[in-house]
Structures are given as structure tokens and as C-alpha cells.
Image (cartoon, grey):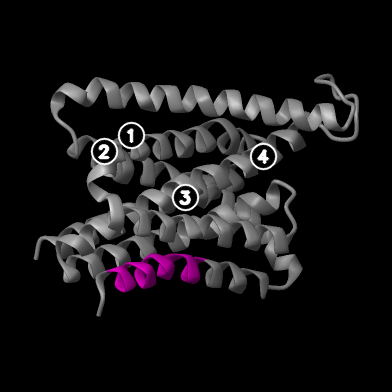
Amino acid sequence: MDTLLLIIIFTALGGVLSVTAAGLFLLLPEKQQNSVLPHGISFAIGALLAVAFWGLIPHAFEEVDPSQFQHLSGMILIGILGFFILEKFLIWRHCHHNHCDAHNEGHESPEVKDHQAAGTLIIVGDSIHNFVDGVLIAAAFLTDIQLGIVTSLAVAAHEIPQEVGDFAILLQSGYSKKKAIFYNILASFGTVVGGILAYFSLEDLHDILPYFLTLAASSFIYIAVADLIPSLHKKTDLKTSLQQIGLIIAGVLLIGGLHNLAFIAEHH
């Protein structure tokens, strides 16, 4: 089969599976959805941090000489500050549009605006991450067909729990179910775009790929630490706190386990 066709098929695989998982979530009764949603936020925190620190950042540093380590670290810092500025702009724009100010005068509280901005950042960060995944899948296929298949399956496997968590964040951010699925599908096209672009210009993208990786990582770190973790502190009872900690750890362990399985598969 033509390599380009394989790249298109397998880059689309993760998006199809993640949207299917989100669709299954919608099949749950509304009461169960409302019950599951906060747990999805906790799980998403662990998944986002694990993808950033165990996947994107290590891979970025593997791709460059030690002389560029400081540049990549700087990109992470720039990314975090940049997403803070972007979120500030999104909150200001939303507030200005609704004729309110930062002192709770208006139609929505700062908490609601913060969540809406977090949803927008999730879409931006996920699109970047998916684009990078597409580049990685294409690079693997151009190296070896079997390696390409293994890599794409590993990407799909870690995308499913992450995308379900992202879907939960979008719902909590005020997006309707239809819009959340639509933006999930839209972001998933980033993988296909990245794969096709890499197929035709991989050499040109190779030097900047590590910087895409660190930018995607910085977006996930910022979202998890600045937007999601503070929302967990609203409930401080012991049972809820233990559930939150357990689900964050579960998200970290699942993503970490999938990365380890992919590493073992690639080296055997």
C-alpha cells in the first residue's frame, strides 16, 4: 500500500477512536454524566502532565544536541507565559463582549470565564499536540512501515483517555455536547495535517519539531496547573480529595504505562 495512504489512515485512527469514546460518554444518562464529569477533570490533569513530562519533553530533548537544551527549556518557559497572556486576552475579550469587568459585575463570574478560556486553550493545545503526533507518525512510516504502525497505535492508545478528559474539560467550560464533539473532531484533523505535511517536507520540519513538542508540552502544563488544579480545591472533604488524588495518579500511570509499552514494542 502507498506510504502516504497509510499515513493518512493511521493519523486519522486516533481521532476516530477518541471521538467514539466521547460519543460513548454521551450515551450515559445525564445524571451519570454529571457524576463522571468532575472525575474526568482529575483524570485529565494526570494525563496532561504525564503526556507533557513523560512524552513530549523527553522526546524533544532526544531530538537535539545538548547545546540546544537551554533553547528548548526557554521555549517551555515562553510557552507557559504565552498561554497565560493568551488566557488573559480571552478572559478580557469575553468580559468586554458582555460589558462586565473584573469585579464580578456582569453576567458571569471570573470562574466561569476562566473555565471558558481553559476550554479554548485545550483546543489550541490539543491541535498543536495532534499536529506533532502526525509528524511523528509520518516520520516513523517513512523509516519503516512496521514502526509506523506501532507508533500510530501507541499514539491512538494514549490519545483516547486524554481526549475523553479534554472532552470533559470542554463540557465544564460551558461548551454544548455537540460543540465539544465538533471541536474534538476539528482538533483531531491536526494529526492528519501534520502527517501529510511531514510526508512532503519532513526534512524542513525536522529542525523545528522539538520546538513544536515543547510548545505543546507547555500548553498542557499550563492548563493542568493554572486552570484545572485550582478547581479541585473547591471541595476539601477527605473522600473527594482522595478520589481526586487517585484519579490524577491513575491518569499519570496510564499514560506512563502506554509510553513504556510503546518503547518496549519499538525496541523488539
**Along the polypeptide, which appears first: circle 3 or circle 2?**
2
How many numbered badges does the structure rendering display?
4
Alpha carbon separation for disc pair 3 and 2: 29 Å
SS under mark 2: helix
Q: Does the magenta portion include 92?
A: no
**Residue 73 visible from this viewpoint:** yes
Label number found at residue 211: 1
Q: Are marks 2 and 1 in contact (CB under 8 Å)?
A: yes
Q: Quadrant of residue 184?
A: bottom right
Verify CB contact (< 8 Å) between mark 1 and mark 4. no
Placement of 115 over or under 151, stated as above or below: above
State the CA–CA distance, disc 1 to disc 3: 32 Å
Magenta stretch mostly in which secondary structure?
helix
Please give the range of residues in magenta.
4-18
In the shown orientation, is residue 159 left or right of residue 33?
A: left
The residue labelled by disc 3 is 246
Q: Which residue is mark 4?
A: 235
Residue 60 shows which numbered tag?
Answer: 2
Mark 2 or 1 closer to N-term? 2
The numbered mark, 2 or 4, whose residue comes first in the sequence reads: 2
Mark 1 and mark 3 lie on one chain; the one further toward the N terminus is 1
User: What is the secondary structure assignment of the residue under circle 1?
Assistant: helix
Kind of residue indicated by mark 1: Tyr
The nearer-to-camera label among 3 and 2 is 2
Check contact, mark 1 vs mark 3: CB within 8 A: no
Residue pictured at 69% horizontal, 49% vertical: 172
* 10 Å crowding of disc 3: few (<14), some (14-19), many (20+): some
Which numbered disc, 2 or 4, marks the residue closer to the eye? 2
In 3D space, how far apart are the residues under numbered discs 2 and 4 (Cα atoms)? 37 Å
| Element type at mark 4 | loop
59 in relation to 7, above or below: above
Mark 2 residue type: Ala
